[in-house]
Amino acid sequence: MSGIAARPALHRMIHAQADAVERMAETDLTAPAEKLAGARRVFLVGTGTSRHAAELGVMMLADAGVDARWASAAQFARWGAQMGPDDAVVVITHTAETAFALRCREQALAAGARLVSLTGIGSGWPDAIETVEREQSETYTVSYTAALAVLAGLAHRLGAAQYGPRELGRTAAAVRAAFEDAAVHRIALPARVLAVIGAGPWAVTAREGALKIREASRTLAEGFEAEHYLHGSAVPFGAADGLLLLEPAADPDGLVAALGAAAQREGIAVSTLEAPENGLPPVLAQLPMTVRLQLLAARFADVRRQNPDVAIVGAWAEQELWTLGAPTG
């Protein structure tokens, strides 16, 4: 067995992402963009990886002058703001089955809000922008980057020039370059915990990358915004742990790099992931950086001899847990 095809499905999904970004750049988003245009507020909601897409989506829509806000689907479903016809809701769920995302969609419809959904192919929802076929690995990758490409396209149509088809084409090229980044192979598997640290949009990518590492390799990893790590989260970290700094040069305050220096003084192994200068807007730069972290997760899974395609097992896989919060109608 050799090559990508002989590996777990995760490897194939990772390497499908550049093509997916290019396809999404060509998607006609006129109708959903019209729904969002002129909305008083635009709420982006999702769970897990989809929540990270919502966070970055808000940054892109804000660049278009949109009052955009993100929330986890569970928080929005039970504790979110009152909606009305002047509001818009973007529900992000690759499977169209996530319990609280389903509830958010039902509530948006009941409130008469303008509804747009981002799903995988085959959801059957009339309000859905369908992105890619269902993931073949439980460590989701291509559905995330495809959703981000769609959100970029929506932001572009609402007035953010930096997220147009040309920029998405350059993003796809940067994703392809990430496949060959040898830096991923120089990051050591820690004995205990890996902290992934970034600033601004790189902080969102830190959390998404840590989630992929946990899912794929069953390695304890945590993603942090740099200031959050400093304010107490660093306390239990020691020589058995590692720090992975994401694009420290992109942090205008220098805190990411300073945390790395402090960690080295504490005897903690420190690694850095930096992308070649490609001139991408900061949010679009998260796509190739995310791919690097996905590749790291896959490598850790290989080292630890874990199956990255089956993440949820045992009591965590019981159906009752996954249906709590779903609409009852």
Image (tube, helix red, strand yellow):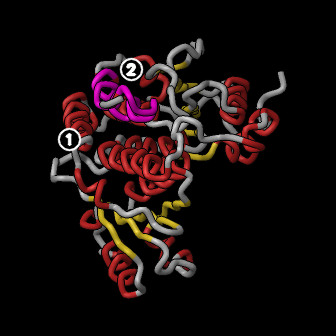
The residue wearing badge 1 is 177
Q: Residue 71, can we see it?
A: yes
Q: Position of residue 133 (x, y in %)?
A: 47, 19
**Number of numbered discs:** 2
Where on the picture, by quarter, is residue 26? Answer: top left
Q: Position of residue 189 (x, y in %)?
A: 43, 62
Q: Position of residue 124 (x, y in %)?
A: 59, 12
Residue 8 among those drawn in magenta: yes
- Residue plotted at (73% across, 38% down): 317
Stretch in magenta: 5-23
Say the numbered circle drawn on residue 199. none
- Residue plotted at (26% across, 39% down): 175
Where on the picture, by quarter, is residue 168? Answer: top left
Left or right: 52 in relation to 286: right
- Quarter the C terminus occupies: top right
Left or right: 125 in relation to 102: left
Q: Earlier in the sequence, mark 2 or mark 1?
A: 2
Spatial separation of the CA atoms under disc 2 and disc 1: 27 Å
- Residue plotted at (19% across, 30% down): 166
Q: Secondary structure at mark 2?
A: loop
Q: Residue 157, can we see it?
A: no
The residue wearing badge 2 is 29
Question: Is residue 80 positioned above or below 27 on the image?
Answer: below
- Quarter the N terminus occupies: top left
Closer-to-camera residue (164/321): 321
Q: Secondary structure at mark 1?
A: helix
Left or right: 141 in relation to 319: left
Say which amino acid is labelled 2.
Leu
